[in-house]
Amino acid sequence: MKDRNRLARLLTAGTLAAGVVLVGASAAGTAWAQGETTTPRVAACGLGAGTPTTSGNSISGTGSRTGCGGTVTLTVQVRKHRVAWPDKVVAEAGRTHFANGVLRATGKCDGNGTYFTETRSSSGNKISSGRVDRC
């Protein structure tokens, strides 16, 4: 019974939170429809990872951090998928005190295979691009 009550409280809290978001979105939509240009926008902090591209025998991938406050150490890697873990790192770039922007990692192809870009933040967040066949 204790678990059921806890679940009910969580569902109620989630419903109320969703209602607040919907009310806020509705108010912003109304302001936009009325032609107001001062509607505040809240940018979400996020990481990005672009699919790797090749040029000759080089492969590169870009990682990004946008809409964030503060700074982190940002690491971008291009990896070649391997059946036996871990995947092989073929390119890597890192920067400390990174606020927002794009960081590119460039390296050499490691033969035909499946490659992807991974972006990691020292805050613990990580994102990977889609996997593509390259080289």
Image: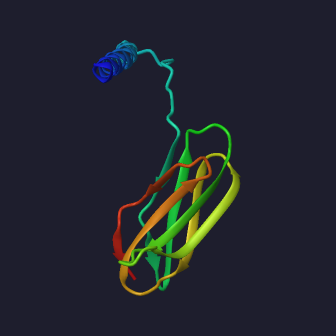
At x 36% / y 62%, what residue is drawn? 130
At x 71% / y 55%, what residue is drawn? 96
The correct choice, above or below, for 131 with respect to 90 in the image is above
In this image, 10 relative to 55: left or right?
left
Closer to the camera in the image, 6 or 131: 6
In this image, 58 relative to 133: left or right?
right
**Disc count in the image?**
0
Q: Position of residue 38 (x, y in %)?
A: 51, 17
Residue 7: quarter of image: top left
Q: Position of residue 111 (x, y in %)?
A: 41, 87
At x 34% / y 16%, what residue is drawn? 9
The correct choice, above or below, for 78 with respect to 71 in the image is below
- In the displayed orientation, state which residue is furthest to the front: 1
At x 49% / y 35%, what residue is drawn? 44
The correct choice, above or below, for 72 with respect to 68 in the image is below
In this image, 135 relative to 63: left or right?
left
Pick the quarter of the image with the N terminus: top left
Q: Position of residue 46 (x, y in %)?
A: 50, 43
Pick the quarter of the image with the C terminus: bottom left
Q: Position of residue 121 (x, y in %)?
A: 58, 52
Which colouring convention does the figure follow?
A: rainbow
